[in-house]
Amino acid sequence: MKIGLFFGSFNPIHIGHLIIANTIYDRTDLNEVWFVVSPQNPFKKRKSLIHEHDRLRMVELAIEDNYHFRASDVEFHMPRPSYTIDTLTYLSEQHPQHQFCLFLGSDNLSQFKKWKNYEQILEHYEIYVYPRPGEKQEFDHPAVHWVNAPLLDVSATFIRESVQKGYSVKYLLPQKVEEYIRDKKLYL
């Protein structure tokens, strides 16, 4: 099977993540999309992250009605911070029957050459890039495929701040994720 890996802190997962994942799944030759919850992104500060198991649970709730989507905690069991090449290598060794590829926002693609062993990623894995506001399609490589997807600017930071201030996050999150955040009193 061909598996698209959507890495993220998902702090929290929101409607923008789901729209992007569904659009890329629908418009490519992928068989599944795995949401890889990253415990610690090497480019982000840890202090704003809620516990990884809460973030994983929210992903599970958000995707439970889509049998093409799967939540993955693979990086929970790996050294931290998480580096994409290490996770790709590990998954490829554990699941040699699958072909893995990577989802990337064009904003992250502009920083891609700063990633650990980015050349190996380009050599061994396809990358599906979706547009982000203010970013141009300037990275040209045979492994990079631009996907026509909605230009979304939904921000997890905006959602967290809204929750902290008591504002509605309806329509920004799947209902079950919104209920989970409320029930567990997350981001307060």
Image (tube, rainbow, N blue to C red):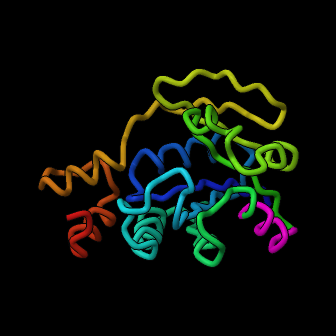
Residue 137 or 115: which is nearer the viewer? 115
Which quarter of the image is occupied by the N terminus? bottom right
Q: Is residue 89 magenta?
A: yes
Where is residue 52? Give x, y as percent: 45, 72
Residue 95 or 11: which is nearer the viewer? 11
Q: Quadrant of residue 142?
A: top right
Residue 150 or 27: which is nearer the viewer? 150
Residue plotted at (14% across, 50% down): 167
Residue plotted at (55% across, 30% down): 131
Where is residue 87? Give x, y as percent: 71, 64
- In this rendering, position of residue 34 left or right of residue 29: left
- In this rendering, position of residue 149 left or right of residue 61: right
Q: Main secondary structure of the magenta part?
A: helix
Residue plotted at (18% across, 57% down): 164
- In this rendering, position of residue 128 left or right of residue 36: right
Q: Quadrant of residue 149?
A: top right
Residue stretch rendered in magenta on the structure? 87-96
Which quarter of the image is occupied by the C terminus? bottom left
Where is residue 41? Give x, y as percent: 54, 57
- In this rendering, position of residue 70 left or right of residue 87: left
Up-down: is 159 above or below 130?
Answer: below
Residue plotted at (40% across, 59% down): 11
